[in-house]
Image: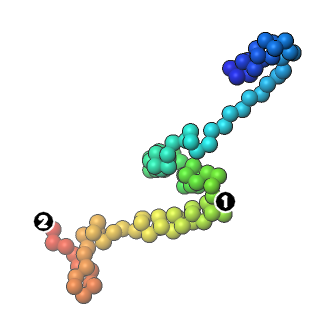
Amino acid sequence: MLVDTTLEVYDNMKKRAPKDYEVSVTFGEYASPDFGTVVEVVGKAKSYGIMSLEQCIEELCGDTWTEEEKALEVKRIRQGDYVLNEPAASIDGLKGDDKGKKVVEDEE
């Protein structure tokens, strides 16, 4: 709005009929927060359950990845999440012995 008005005033000063200006300014990555900050914010949103995995990938990769690359990344993460969601032996009170067998830890 300010730039439009300034250009119209300039037209008037030059004794020209003011034109209808439509000014658009875009800022590339330089005006964006750094990747680490984006990861932190998006990660918090995902962990709070307010952002889907697909939207997280969209926010992180934006226009730099194709839709196919984004879909593949979502698939990879979901496969990794499946493994990560399995209970860990140490949480269940189990540990491996020297022969690779699982034994119950002593409770203190």
Q: Name the residue under label 1.
A: 66
* Residue 45 in sight from this viewpoint: no
Q: Name the residue under label 2.
A: 108
What residue is at 15 percent from the left and 68 percent from the top? 107
* Residue 4 in sight from this viewpoint: yes
What residue is at 22 percent from the left and 75 percent from the top? 104
Q: Do the residues labelled 1 and 2 touch (CB within 8 Å)?
A: no
What residue is at 51 percent from the left and 42 percent from the top? 33
Q: Out of 28 and 87, give the one closest to the viewer.
A: 28
**Up-down relation of residue 24 to residue 54 (above or below):** above
Point out residue 28 in the picture as x, y percentages from the top left corner.
62, 42
State the image quarter where residue 15 is shown.
top right
- Which residue extends farthest right? 17
Point out residue 5 in the picture as x, y percentages from the top left corner.
73, 18
**Up-down relation of residue 11 to residue 74 (above or below):** above
What residue is at 83 percent from the left and 17 percent from the top? 18
Please give the count of numbered marks on the rendered protein: 2
